[in-house]
Amino acid sequence: MEKELIGTPGDYSENLYRFYLELADCSPDTRRLLEDFLPQYHALRITDLDQGYEFEMPIQSAPDLVRHLLDRNIAVYQLVRLARAKGHWRRQ
């Protein structure tokens, strides 16, 4: 991958980033939707916050996650990429 694409919407690598997801509905059912979207290893590492969650995934997964939630009538108020994270998207 070209260095100038790392960390941009053109980053189709499996580099991990920490994200903050703010939702109107943080019920157990909504958390389960997020857990179902993420690989098991990452689903176990979700941090619950008052208005949302923090977790790790590649940038390329962001639009798919938002679509996954919107298709189930979950309002997404923001999805913010926080910082690059260590680790692998798929367990090796």
Image (cartoon, grey):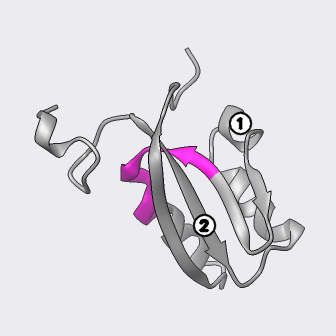
Give the magenta-colored segment's residue range. Answer: 55-64
Tell me if residue 31 comes above or below residue 14 in the rendering: below
Quadrant holding the C terminus = top right
Q: Quadrant of residue 44?
A: top right
User: Which residue reaches farthest front?
Assistant: 83
Question: Would residue 37 be seen by someone viewing this image from the given angle?
Answer: no
Task: Identify residue type, mark 1.
Answer: Gln
From the viewer's perspective, is 79 left or right of 48?
Answer: left
Q: Earlier in the sequence, mark 2 or mark 1?
A: 2
Kindly identify the residue that appears in the image at 36 percent across and 51 percent down.
Answer: 60
Q: Which residue is mark 2?
A: 21
User: Which residue reaches farthest right?
Assistant: 28
Residue 58 in picture, x, y percent from top left:
43, 44
Q: Which residue is mark 1?
A: 40
Task: Identify residue type, mark 2.
Answer: Leu
- Exactly how many numbered labels are in the figure? 2
